[in-house]
Amino acid sequence: MPRVLLSSLCFLVWPAHSWCQAKPQLSPAASVFIKEDAPVMALAHVRVVDGTGAAARTDQTLVIAEGKIVALGDSATTKTPDGAKVLNLTGRTVIPGLVGMHDHMFYPSPGGGLPLYPEHAASFPRLYLAGGVTSIRTTGSLEPYADLELKQAIDLGRLAGPKIHVTGPYLEGPGAFALQMHQLKDAEDARQMVEFWIARGATSFKAYMNITPDELAAALKAAHAHGVKVTGHLCSIGFREAAALGIDDLEHGIEVDTEFLPDKKPGVCPNPQAAAKALLAVDIAGKPMQDMIHDLVAHHVAVTSTLPVFETSVPGRAPLDSRVLEAMTPEARVAYLTRRARVSDNSLTSDAPGIFKKELEFEHEFSKQGGLLLAGLDPTGYGGVIAGFGDQREVELLVEAGFTPVEAIHIATSNGAQFLGELDKIGTLAVGKAADLVVLEGDPSANIKDIERVELVFKDGVGYDSAKLIDSVKGLVGLR
């Protein structure tokens, strides 16, 4: 049905429906990836995992009109509007679009020398969307102006990509390992930095490893005055100290928490090997860890899981995914495989397997105690984790941590939307919400590996071809 005819029908027949609204036109650069864009669509006879944590429902029909979900229920009783395009999705599953909560727009340069992380504005938006990620928080920007301009281009329909919540530049003190990071001078510098970037559109901030307690406190005060949240990948500051200061979220889990090192100096990032040894000695069920978890929950501090990036540090563990290797430039592929082999050579002396196992246990326990667990991928490390594919791997690893598949999907969708304050719009499948959803072959509620079998990704009711998006950026990761 032509869109102009649909608009006339809306005016004459459906004036009370808020979903009868014209959508912005997409540019050729975005529309080339669209497979389904009928004004009204019915996804019929599909299995639904709605993101709430409820069990999968079979033989459902979900109706999309003008970017919204307007009906959802049993196929036998859910009416399909006259003129709607019907997709028979027998054997497929629909889940909410993933909400990536640690999804950078940069990736490590394979060139060696200085640690540099070039912006991947060409490949990453398409790969996130292709992987079923319809919303992201960048969780630390190295090129914040590029992130803001990229967000605008996607919002205006000029480029294909997810909805982006832009995090400001890293709030880092002296000792930053990346040349692209500003190093804070003092608390006033932190305050000014937060104010400057909020005025330019940043919607969150990330405190980093060498920030001081005074600088973090100043950043938190300035951000919270604007209703903006702050997360942290911390080292100089322990989790409980950060919670007392008022931080909203903590990245990576206990893999980076240094507070269990007995002789840790206040405000100083300790030796990472010593911190790892101390963490290995801590029992998840023991009082020190339980006290820390209860403290985080009491202060309403969320934790973002980024299991894929830590998995690459465990010798021989991360899957050799052909999709990931094909997405890389030849130089990035060689650099990654070389480093991967070096990690495997250190298998006898590595603490990584024990730390990774403890992280899995911690995340399950934190959630069980009532903590809000979020999901991301963190496409950094030494290059084995990339946009979209890493988000899928994160969901698989949450299942390995002890969550059921529907619980893992809930964490990767609803929990992220809740933290962003957008649960009324995205994160679960329900009438009135944005039609941000993923069509998967198979049944991820029974086999979580089916999370990788993405066929279509709908964002605001527009269905993108996952395979076409992936093919368009093969050989680009590591470059742009």
Image (cartoon, rainbow, N blue to C red):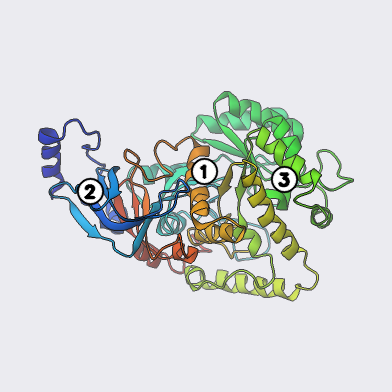
Residue 57 visible to an observer of this rendering: yes
Instruction: Tell me the crowding category of disc 1: few under 14, some 14 to 19, or many 20 or more residues within 10 angstroms, Cα based.
Output: many
Residue at x-position 59% and y-position 42%: 372
Q: Going from the N terminus, do you reach mark 3 or mark 2 first?
A: 2
The kind of secondary structure element at disc 2 is: loop
Mark 2 sits on what residue?
77
Residue 310 versus residue 190: which sits nearer the camera? 310
Q: Distance from label 3 to label 1 (Cα)?
A: 25 Å
Q: Quick check: 424 above or below 129?
A: above
Q: Of discs 1 and 2, which sits in the foreground?
A: 2
The amino acid marked with disc number 1 is: Asn
The amino acid marked with disc number 2 is: Thr
The kind of secondary structure element at disc 1 is: helix
Coordinates of residue 249 in the picture (x, y in percent): 62, 39
Q: Quick check: 458 above or below 24?
A: below
Coordinates of residue 15 in the picture (x, y in percent): 16, 31
The amino acid marked with disc number 3 is: Met
Q: Going from the N terminus, do you reach mark 3 or mark 1 first?
A: 3
The kind of secondary structure element at disc 3 is: loop
Question: Hey, which quadrant is residue 152 in on the image?
Answer: top left
Q: Which disc number belongs to residue 209? A: 3
Q: Which disc number belongs to residue 415? A: 1
Q: Distance from label 3 to label 2 (Cα)?
A: 55 Å
